[in-house]
Image (cartoon, grey):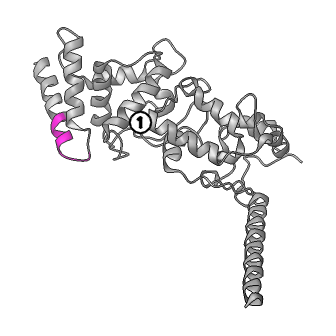
Amino acid sequence: MKSFTTGALVALLLFAGAAGAEVPADYLRSLDAAARAGTPGFGGFSAARGAQWFASRHGSDWSCATCHTDRPLASGRHATTGRAIAPLAPAASPERLTDAAKIEKWFRRNCNDVLGRACTPAEKGDVIAWLTSLKQ
Amino acid sequence: MFDDRRRRWFDGIAWTAAAVALALLVDAAEAGEHRYPVDNAVYKAECGSCHVAYPPALLGAGTWREIMRGLDKHFGTDAGLGESAHAQVSAYLEAGAGGPRREVRTLRISNASWFRKEHDEVSAAAWKSAAVKSPANCGACHRQAERGDFGERSLRVPGGVVR
């Protein structure tokens, strides 16, 4: 049942990617392949895991939610500069998560700030699954 | 024949002088209004997503170079850029940089003496207010900061200023 749900989720994400202004399908496929290669028994991305991860401080001062709010359908604020940040969830900001290079750039910067390391493909896929599941 | 050529030559000089004078006048007017153009799309996209895209003229070329050298540890965050964006942003900042008096050893615009002088009317309470939080948050008071307009007409300080 669980593997069916995660399989359906991946399929849904892939389908959404193919539909146009959504997460690029080939980017999700490459994340999924990398996660499978890196984690034996990986059962697909999980929005629930992504939600928890987004709110966690990972042992540092910041979580993703520090700047993006704990429900990123709302606008956030940069923790140090105070600058407004447009909502991260595509349901609120349609241009979000539509450009693989941009997604990777922000993971590179922000994972370093929040986790002090690069995010794993599984972490990226989980949080994308959660962000794209949010509805207004 | 000779006179004609000489007149044209003088005309040329006069027009050039007029153009230079006009340019200087516009420059002076813009400085008086605290307008500093910020007109590079890559710079705005890459740097302006975390903070106001600070006008290049507010720091000297040496300070910008130093900032661009340390982007992976940029005031406590990773602001690293790809090679192409890094080159484009560096070139833009250095081309529009202010003179030697705009160099700041600490790399913070808010530490420059002109910055402190310009902001000496801002109360401690205003600086600490939730709407401002950080001197990097230009847009909290300078409502047109995103356009490089730091003039008084678009200035609203939360709780007012102390005089």
The image shows residue B20 at horizontal and vertical percentages of: 75, 68
Q: Is residue A15 above or below residue B31?
A: above
Q: Position of residue B35 (x, y in %)?
A: 70, 57
Residue B41 is one of the magenta-drawn residues: no
Examine the image and state in which quarter residue A9 appears: top left
- Residue drawn at (45%, 38%) of the image: B84
Q: Position of residue A119 (x, y in %)?
A: 37, 19
Is residue A33 visible from the viewing direction of this image? yes
Residue A21 versus residue B106 in the image, above or below: below
Left/right of residue B151 with respect to residue A11 in the rendered view: right
The one nearer the camera, B116 or A56, is: B116
x and y, in percent, of residue A45 in the image: 23, 23
Outermost residue to the top? A40
Q: Secondary structure at mark 1?
A: loop
**Residue A19 lies in the magenta-colored region:** yes
Highlighted range, magenta: A14-21
Q: Nearer the viewer, residue A6 or B99?
A: B99
Magenta stretch prevailing secondary structure: helix
Q: Residue at x 37, y 37 (%)?
A: A102
A20 or B37: which is nearer to us? B37
Q: Residues within 10 Å of mark 1 (few under 14, many from 20)?
A: many
Q: Is residue B134 visible in this depiction of the protein?
A: no
Q: Nearer the viewer, residue A56 or B98?
A: B98
Q: Residue tagged by mark 1?
A: A72
Q: Type of residue at label 1?
A: Pro
Look at 32% across and 40% down and name the residue there: A99
